[in-house]
Amino acid sequence: MNGLSAVECYLQDFHQRIVGSTPAAFSKLPAKANGVIHASSYHVLASLIPGETRSATVLDLGCGDGHLLGLLADRRQPGLDLIGVDMSRAELEAARASLPGDVALLNERAQHLSVESGSVQFVLSHMALMLMDDIEQVFSEIRRVLSSRGTVSFIVGRSFLSGPVKQLYVDALRPIAKDEGAQLRFGDPRTQLEDCWAALLSRSFHEVACTDVDVDWTPSPGELWESLSTTYDVDRLSVSGRAALRERFLAALVEVQEHDGRIRTGWGQRLVTAKARRH
C-alpha cells in the first residue's frame, strides 16, 4: 500500500508493534445498548447479524486481530461467509492464526477494497471508522460492496473515559504532549459528533440511527494505567514522557478512588446503523 498518510503510517507502525490492543481494552467489558447488557461491545455488533440468515456475507472493516470475526465464526452458522479487512499485516497474521481457514482476510485500505460490488449483505466495524482518512470515500466503498438491501453497522468512540477520571487524565497528559509535540489528528472531526453521521451517510444510505453504548469499568489504578499505556496518545510520547504521565496520573487518581481502591469510570461508544440506498 503506497501513498499512505502520516496517520496511516503511524497506525501501521503501532499495530505492527502492539497487536490486539482494541480487544484487550473492550472484549471483556460488558456493554449496555438500548437497555440490553451484552458481554462486550463486540457482542453488540455480532448480535445484529441474524442467526437465521441462510446465506450472507459479512465484512468486518478494520478487523484487527479478528476478535469480532471470531464471535461470528464460533456460531458455525451455515451460509455465513466472513471477510476481514485491515491495513496491518501483523493484526491479520494474528487473525489468521485464530480464525478458521475459510475466513477471507484482506490486507487493504478501506478506501480501496478489492471486494466485488454488491456481494456483501452486512458491513461491520468496531472502533475503526473514526480513525480513517477520507471518510466519504470509505462510505462510498462500503456502499459499493453492499447489496441493494445491505446494512452497515459500526461502533465508534463517543467519550474517552467517564466521570472525573477523564479530566484528571487530560490535565496530566496535555502539558506533556504539548512539550513533546506529540500531536497527530486522527480521522475526520465530524465523526466525533452524532449530528454529523446522518450527513456523512446521506449520499449512499438511509434510515441512519445512532445509539449510545455504555461500557462501565471499575479498574484498579494499575489496571487503568496499563490499558491507557497502549493508547495512541501515550504511545507517541517519549519514554520519559510516558514515565512522567504515569507518575502524575496515578498520583491524581488517589482523590477519586473508591473505598476498595478501585476507580469508577468507563467508555462511551456510539453504535451507528444504516441501510443502503438503492442505486
Image (spheres, grey):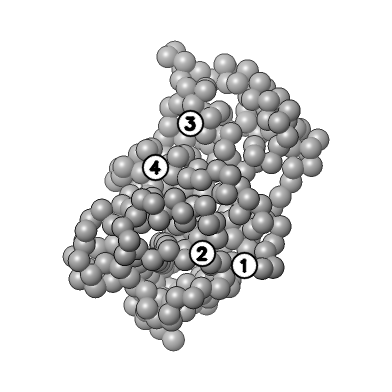
Could you tell me which secondary element the residue under label 4 belongs to? loop
Dot 1 and dot 2 residues touching (CB under 8 Å): yes
Mark 4 or mark 2: name the one nearer the start of the chain: 4
Dot 2 and dot 3 residues touching (CB under 8 Å): no
Residue type indicated by callout 2:
Asn
Q: What label sits on residue 61 in the rendered view?
A: none
Q: What label sits on residue 265 in the rendered view?
A: 3
How much space separates mark 4 and mark 2, taking CA atoms? 23 Å
Disc nearest the viewer among 4 and 2: 2
Residue type indicated by callout 3:
Thr
Can you say whether 115 is above or below 129 in the image? below
Q: Residue furthest bottom?
A: 279
**Residue plotted at (61% across, 47% down):** 14
How much space separates mark 1 and mark 4, taking CA atoms? 29 Å
Dot 3 and dot 4 residues touching (CB under 8 Å): no
**Residue plotted at (52% across, 34% down):** 227
Q: Name the residue that disc number 4 marks.
A: 27
**Residue plotted at (69% across, 52% down):** 185
Could you tell me which secondary element the residue under label 2 belongs to? strand
Image location of residue 124, percent across then percent down: 41, 62
Residue 217 picture quarter: top left
Viewer-proximal residue, 70 or 231?
A: 70
Q: Residues within 10 Å of mark 1 (few under 14, many from 20)?
A: few
